[in-house]
Image (cartoon, coloured by chain):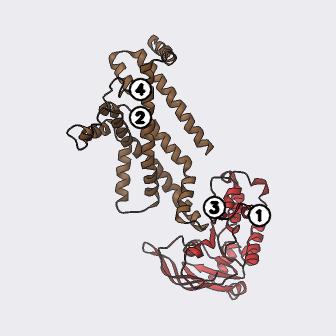
Chain colours: A brown, B red
Amino acid sequence: MDYIIQGFGEAIGLLLSFDKEIYSIILLTLYVTLMSTFIAALIAVPLGILMGIKNFVFKKTLIRLLYTFMSMPPVIAGLFVFLILSRRGPLGQLELLFTPTAMIIAQVLLVAPIIMGITYNNTREKGKTIKQVAHTLGASKLQALVLLLFELRADILAAVVSGFGRAISEVGAVILVGGNIKGHTRVMTTSIAMLQSMGDYSQAIAIGVVLLVISFVINSILYQGQKVI
Amino acid sequence: MDIVLQNILKKYGNKTVLHIDKLELKAGLVTGIIGPNGSGKSTLMKIIAGLDNAFTGSLRINGGEVNQEINKNMTMVFQKPYLINTDVYNNIAYPLKIRGKSKTEINNKLQNVIRLMKLEGIAHQNACTLSGGEMQKVALARAIVFEPRLLLLDEPTANIDPQTMQLMENAISYVNQRCNTTVIIVTHNIGQLQRMCREAVFMREGKVEKQGTMRDILSNIKGTYIDEFLELDM
C-alpha cells in the first residue's frame, strides 16, 4: 500500500520538478496521440458518413470488416505496421520504423475504425431523416450535406473522443513500432510498461497518474465542446 | 401546382403498396387524402415529394417532370417532424437561408410567421426541447415561411390539442388563399377534412377508391366501405 501512496506523492513531485525527460515524454505522448486522432478523424469521419448515407455493393461485408477492425488487438496493428515499415518491408526505404511517425501510423490504424464505426452508426440512424428534411425544404445536395454535418456534430465529436481515448491508452502497437527509445519514441504508456517490468512501481504510478490527469483534462475540454455545440 | 399521376405502381418486394391508374390533384386547392392505415397515403405523399423514386409510372407537376425548380417550390410536413438542433428562430429561417435571402427579408418573414403561428414565447428556445404540439407548429411555420407553391402535409395535426389544431388549420388556409398554394393533406380527422378541403381522395389497399368534392365523397356511400370507415373513424 505504501508504494501506491508514494506513487501519488511522486506524481506531484514529478510534475513540479519540471524534469526534462518527463516533460519530453508527456509532450511526445500528446503529439502522437493528438496527431493520430486528428489524421484518423480526417479520414474516418467522411468515410463513416459516406457509408451511412450511400448504398453500394459489398457494403455489408465492409461493415463486418469495419467492426472487426474496431476491436483489432493493438499488437496486431503494431505488427502489421512493423512489417510494412521494417527494412525488408514494402515501405522499408522510408526508414520510419522506431520513429514517432511510425507510432502515429499504427495509432491511425487503430483509431480510424473506431471513429468511422461510430460515425457510420450515427449517420445510419439519423442520416436518412436529415436528408429527407433537407430535400423537402429545397436544399441542394451540398446544403443537405452541410446540414447533415451540422446535425451530427455532437456525435462526430463523441466519436473523436472515443478515438482519442483509444490512442492515449494504447501501448501494444506503439511499443512494437516505436521501440520505447529514451528521448525519441518513449511515451507515457510505454514508460509505465517498462517501469513496471523494472519493478519501479512508484515511478510507474506517478506517470500513470499524470496520464490520467492529461486524459481527464483533454476529455473535459472535448466534453465541454460537445455541450457547447 | 397541379399534379398528375399515371400508372403508378409501387411495390415492396412482392407486395403492391400503391397502384394508381390516374390521379389528378388540382392547383390552388386544399385536397384531403383519406383512407385506412396501409392504404398507401403516405407512400403517395413521399412519391409526390420526391422522397421515393423507386416506382414505375409517371408523375408530372405543372405539366412537366419534377425538377430542381419544382423541388425548391414544394415542401412536406411529416407527422413526426424532424427539427434542426438549434433554436426555433433558426429552424424556421433555414429554408430562407438556403435560398440566399437577405437578413432583412428573413427577419420580416419570420416575424410574420412567428406571429401567425403564435411562437413568440419560444422563438429562442432550442427546438429539440419543445413539446410534440410545439414541434408540429414549428415544422409548419418552417414549411410555409418561404411560401411554397405545393404544401404536402402528412397528418400534421395528429395527437395535438384542438386549439393548436385550429391555429394550424388557419395557417394552412391562410397560405392556400394568400399564396395560391396547392395543399395536399393526409388526415384521419373527418371534421378537419370537411373544414379544410374542397376535394378529397379516398384510398384503400393502395388504390384510389373515390375522388371528388367532399359532397361527392360523402354522397351515395350508404352500405359501402367508405361509409363503414367514416362511421368508425368519427
Q: Mark 3: which secondary structure?
A: loop
* Image depth: mark 2 or mark 4 in front: 2
Distance from disc 2 to disc 1, alpha carbons, whole Å, reads 51 Å
Q: Give a yes or no on whether discs 2 and 4 share a subunit.
A: yes
Q: Quadrant of residue A192?
A: top left
- Confirm whether residue B215 shows in the render: yes
Amino acid type, callout 2: Val
Q: Which residue is mark 2?
A: A32
Neighbour tally class for label 1: few under 14, some 14-19, many 20 plus, Cα within 10 Å = few
Relative to A220, residue A229 above or below = below
* Mark number displayed over residue B81: 3
* Mark number displayed over residue A188: 4
* Image depth: mark 4 or mark 1 in front: 1
Which circle's residue, 1 or 3, is located before the other in the chain?
3
Q: Give a yes or no on whether discs 3 and 2 share a subunit.
A: no
Distance from disc 3 to disc 4, alpha carbons, whole Å, reads 49 Å
Residue A71, percent across and down? 37, 42
Q: Mark 4: which secondary structure?
A: helix
Chain label for disc 1? B
Q: Mark 1: which secondary structure?
A: helix
* Image depth: mark 3 or mark 4 in front: 4
Amino acid type, callout 1: Asn
* Image depth: mark 3 or mark 2 in front: 2
- Which quadrant: the N terminus of chain B? bottom right
